């Protein structure tokens, strides 16, 4: 069964500090992995997408990594800001011929990140 | 573009009542998705449409749930009769391309409370 596990479930850090969120998956055959940011009371917004051949991708202070061999991804946030407080959701897509929902999408339950001043 | 539009933003109803949630996708997008989000289960796909045709409704929890997409610019999710366990935030999302690499754009969600 395709699964996506995220850790930690929640995290509190001080403003200005760095943090790393983890995503482990068992989705197969793998197509791509997205990280979404969901602010409180709003819908998720895509931060980055990574395909099999990509190891690292950055979007401002956000850097995502992918290790397709170990089936792990991380999202690193540098110099955190209060606006980074949100839930971060990892979504893994299987190739269309695979299983798991709409076009093979499997969602993690998210990491709830709180940045304290 | 205004993005994906959902209405109402909040709905409070009593058990047994019919609830209809509405969604207007981004113009030109040909895929539409309905999700339910709870603290316990996270985001769950309920149903999705390609070119107004339901493709996968395996996530619809039971017969009380139904979804329609009569045209490319409008979709509804109906719950009849509603139950307290249906309380959740319901999101609609749209995508411009078929295939899993296309980005889904989410609406602001409808927070449903069933008393």
Image: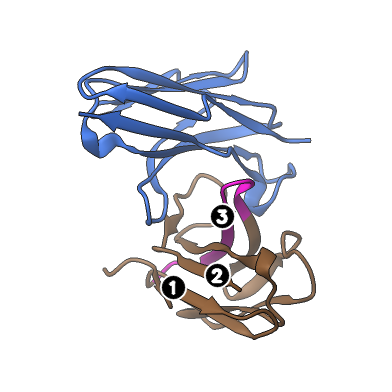
Chain colours: A blue, B brown
Give the mark nearer the N terminus: 2 vs 3.
3
Q: Is residue A105 left or right of residue A40?
A: right
Give the mark nearer the N terminus: 1 vs 2.
1
Q: CA distance from mark 1 to mark 2?
A: 8 Å
Among the 4 quarters of the image, the one containing residue A37: top left
Q: Is residue B57 above or below residue B67?
A: above
Q: Is residue A2 left or right of residue A77?
A: right
**Helix, strand or loop for the magenta stretch, by majority:** strand
Residue ID at (63%, 32%):
A4
Asked whether residue A34 appears in the rendered view, the answer is yes
Determine which residue is flagged by label 3: B37
Q: Quadrant of the C terminus of chain A?
A: top left
Q: Quadrant of the N terminus of chain A?
A: top right
Using the rendered image, report if marks 1 and 3 lie on a common chain: yes
Q: Which residues are magenta?
A: B28-44
Q: Is residue A7 left or right of residue A101?
A: left
Q: Is residue A115 above or below residue B101?
A: above
Determine which residue is flagged by label 2: B113
Compare residues A4 and B54 and report the one nearer the observer.
Answer: A4
> Which type of secondary structure does the marked residue at label 1 adopt?
strand
User: Residue B84 location in percent, x, y?
Assistant: 66, 69
Q: Indicate the chain on which mark 1 is placed.
A: B
The image's mark for residue B10 is 1
Residue ID at (41%, 63%):
B107
Q: Indicate the chain on which mark 3 is placed.
A: B
Q: Indicate the chain on which mark 2 is placed.
A: B
Q: Is residue A79 left or right of residue B51?
A: left
> Which type of secondary structure does the marked residue at label 3 adopt?
strand
In reply to whether residue B10 is colored magenta, the answer given is no
């Amino acid at each position: 069964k395709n699964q996506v596990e995220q850790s930690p479930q929640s995290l509190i850090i001080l403003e200005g500090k760095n943090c790393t969120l983890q995503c482990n998956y068992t989705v197969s055959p793998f197509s791509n992995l997205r990280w979404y940011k969901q602010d409180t009371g709003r819908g998720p917004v895509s931060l980055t997408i990574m395909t099999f051949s990509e190891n690292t991708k950055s979007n401002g202070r956000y850097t995502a990594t992918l290790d397709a061999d170990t089936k792990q991804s991380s999202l690193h946030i540098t110099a955190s800001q209060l606006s980074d407080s949100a839930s971060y959701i990892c979504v893994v897509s299987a190739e269309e011929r695979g299983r798991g929902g709409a076009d093979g999408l499997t969602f993690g339950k998210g990491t709830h990140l709180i940045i304290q001043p | 573009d205004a993005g994906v539009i959902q209405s109402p933003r909040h709905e409070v109803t009593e058990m047994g009542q019919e609830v209809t949630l509405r969604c207007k996708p981004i113009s030109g997008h040909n895929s539409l998705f309905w999700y339910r989000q709870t603290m316990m289960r996270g985001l769950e796909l309920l149903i999705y449409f390609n070119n107004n045709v339901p493709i996968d409704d395996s996530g619809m929890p039971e017969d009380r749930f139904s979804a329609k997409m009569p045209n490319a610019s409008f979709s509804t999710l109906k719950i009849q009769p509603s139950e307290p366990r249906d309380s959740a935030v319901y999101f609609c999302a749209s995508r411009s391309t078929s295939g899993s690499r296309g980005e889904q754009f989410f609406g602001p969600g409808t927070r449903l409370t069933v008393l």
